[in-house]
Structure formats: C-alpha cells, structure tokens
Image: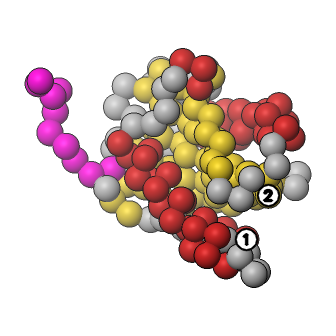
Amino acid sequence: MKLSENYRARPIRFVDLWELGEWKLKVYSITYTDNPLASALVDTAHQVALARLKESASRTNHYAVGFVGIHQGKIGNFVFVDWWADENELHHHVYVSSSAEPDKLEYMTPSGLTACAWDLYLIGHERDAWVNHVLKQSEAPNLAGYLGARLNDDV
C-alpha cells in the first residue's frame, strides 16, 4: 500500500452550540489546513442538520441532544449529524460535498460511508462524554454536563 501523503494532525475545534427547536447540538470543525470553515459549508451543514432531525429523529426515542461535525477535508467536505437515543445508541448521518461546491452536500449514509479517522476521534470523544455524564449518572443523567464536555485538540 502506498499513501498519498504523510499523516499530519488536524485541528478539531468546538465551534458553537446550535439550538434548533428543542434540540441542542454541539458543532465542531475539523480542517485539513488551518483555514477557517467556508461559510457556505457551515450554512449548508445547518440546513441539513435541521432537515435530518425533522425527517428522522422524531422516529427515535431521543433526548434532543447530539453533535454535528463539519470536516473541511483535503479534496472534499464531510458533515455528520448525530444524536443519542434509547439511552446508549448513536444515530449517525453522513453528507459529502466537493471542495469546489461546499453547499452541495449529498446524503451518503445509505452508501455505507461512516467516518474518516479524524471523524472517529471526535465520535469517540462524544461517546466518552455521553458515558461519563449520562450513562454513569443513571440516578440523575447530566445533559448539561454532556453539552459542556467539548473537544479542542489537534489529532
């Protein structure tokens, strides 16, 4: 196997807490370079998150909390919309666009595409935050603590 380039860390940063109706979603950026996220990508991510919650989340036993990853990659963009349901289940939906057209996100979940290595790191952080603030606190799950557990790291 030959890789196209050497591994280098990418910054993962907490960006915002989106409140979409009853929902509270932690929003993160992951970038291939140090350049800020394209505003068209952020705007489109917001739109697809809202649409995905309206279309799918109502059919789940959810808690109206989750996270969004906006990954501005080397040759394309990934956006994932995730929420917690049924105590310990993560619902994960993936969208992809080209670098040239960040506002043209295509729904990829039915294709089987899940995540890249950097996306998985963020998902792992969110899993640990859910376990520590909710599952391990079964007498009084701490959703505010979960929402306050935020990742800012270069990985």
- Depth order, front residue of 42/58: 58
Q: Return the disc, 2 or 1, that comes first in the chain's sequence.
A: 2
Identified at 49% across, 26% down, the residue is: 113
Is residue 2 covered in magenta?
yes
Q: Which mark is residue 143?
A: 1
Q: Amino acid at mark 1?
A: Leu
Disc 2 secondary structure class:
strand
Image spot of residue 147 (x, y percent): 66, 68
Q: Amino acid at mark 2?
A: Tyr
Against 66, residue 32 (above or below) is above
In the rendered structure, the answer to whether residue 127 lies left or right of residue 147 reads left
What segment is highlighted magenta in the picture? 1-10
Against 105, residue 117 (above or below) is below
Q: Main secondary structure of the magenta part?
A: loop
Image spot of residue 46 (x, y percent): 71, 40
Image spot of residue 73 (x, y percent): 40, 35
In the rendered structure, the answer to whether residue 39 lies left or right of residue 36 reads right
Callout 2 touching callout 1 (CB < 8 Å): yes
Q: Quadrant of residue 14?
A: bottom right
Identified at 11% across, 24% down, the residue is: 2
Residue occupied by mark 2? 63
- Depth order, front residue of 17/1: 1
Identified at 65% across, 56% down, the residue is: 88
Report, in whole angstroms, how far the alpha carbon at label 2 lies from the one at label 1. Answer: 9 Å
Q: Residues within 10 Å of mark 1 (few under 14, many from 20)?
A: some
